[in-house]
Amino acid sequence: QPLHKAHHMTDIPTRLIICHFQKAYYKTSKIPVMSMGSNRAAHETETSSPSNDRDTHQSVDVTRRRFIATSAAGVAGLGALGSAGSAAAASGEHTLVIEGFDSQTSYSFTVGNNLEKSTAEGATIDDNDEIIDQSAHGQVWEGKDAYTFDGPLYSFDFDRSGEINVTLDGEPARVGNRPDHTLVIEGFGPVTSYSFSTSGRAKHSDAYGATVNKAEKINDYGVTGAVQNGKDAFTYDGELLSFDFDRDGEVRVTIDGKAAHVGQRPDRTITVVAKGRYAEYRVGFEGTIREVIDAESGQDGINEDKFEGLPDEDGDQTFDGAVSGTGYDRFTIDGDVTNTVHHNDNAPAIYSNYRQIL
């Protein structure tokens, strides 16, 4: 967790470093399945560098998961804990049973294949439980829902205000120790680069027949990759904070089988990470700021001259902040970063989705 930030400056040099970035357009509208511009292939424009290729060792605990669910008895409720269970075997039919109690609880999950509703253990088949390819979305209340499937149980999420008991082949499913969601990015011809950020660190997945390729890179702050005629998939905890892609390409993005509506989400998550010392910074960007996720309201501000000596470059939108110790600030924007300003000896690390820009 971020350390409490200092409210005063100590030994801050007067010399500044101003970094400029090539400006890029920002979108005004997007849709989950999008094809814009010409049909030419949209190749990834970012070249690899040592700072981009390696995963950072400065871990930021950005998970939004409220708790790890499921006890040894398999009850996934508030405050319950459980040890990690292995994924289901790669072949053979499996039975997943979800038992509800006093309140209606919604859930969603993604599996390998051949997903079907079942009446196992007295479960009922209800119209409000929906199967979308390899994913299911449903609600349970004082009864049981059951499903059969082949392959792994990739992810499972449920409404944490409720209480459910989940078993896999008669044993505790330990859903609290599995990822919340499965994100799938499908390409349709042109090479289309993308980047995104989630509140919990993402991991590669082979769900929905996806393959892992060399273009995909993951660190604590985001993911970058490219897709052509195929699928990339990732599992993660928490929320999808931002998603951006090359508008000359065409992609379809889903979360647990449903449209991710990436056109309604911010393009980029900007994460500013302290390197041990107190550091003031300013980030300039084109477009609009969407949400301040992690920042101290007393020291961080939009289009405010919070710190003397940090100039406003090019008249763009700006975000001022300060980080210290192992702390970080994080906010989302549409558009792209155009410049950063910081005091020379106290530069923080700044990431735009996956890519380190300072």
Image (cartoon, helix red, strand yellow):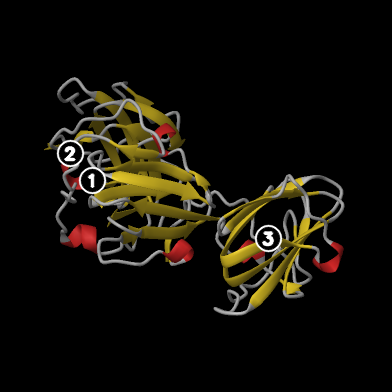
| 3 or 2: tag closer to the N-terminus | 2
For label 3, the SS is loop
In the image, residue 167 sits, relative to residue 231, either above or below, namely below
Work out how far the residue at label 1 is from the one at label 3, CA to CA, in angstroms: 40 Å
The answer to whether residue 8 of the structure is visible from this angle is no
Residue under pointer 2: 13
Residue under pointer 1: 346
Q: Residues within 10 Å of mark 1 (few under 14, many from 20)?
A: many
In this view, the mark in front (3 or 2):
3
**Is residue 131 left or right of 264 when viewed as pictured?**
right
Cβ atoms at labels 1 and 3 below 8 Å apart: no
The answer to whether residue 146 of the structure is visible from this angle is yes
Percent position of residue 273, x then y: 33, 48
Q: Which kind of residue does numbered mark 3 sit on?
A: Ala
Percent position of residue 30, x then y: 36, 32
In this view, the mark in front (1 or 3):
3
Q: Residues within 10 Å of mark 3 (few under 14, many from 20)?
A: many
In the image, residue 252 sits, relative to residue 206, either above or below, namely above
Q: Residue at x 30, y 63 (%)?
A: 55
Work out how far the residue at label 3 is from the one at label 2, CA to CA, in angstroms: 48 Å
**Is residue 22 left or right of 32 when viewed as pictured?**
left
Asked whether 194 or 113 is in front, the reply is 113
Residue under pointer 3: 69
Percent position of residue 229, x then y: 30, 57
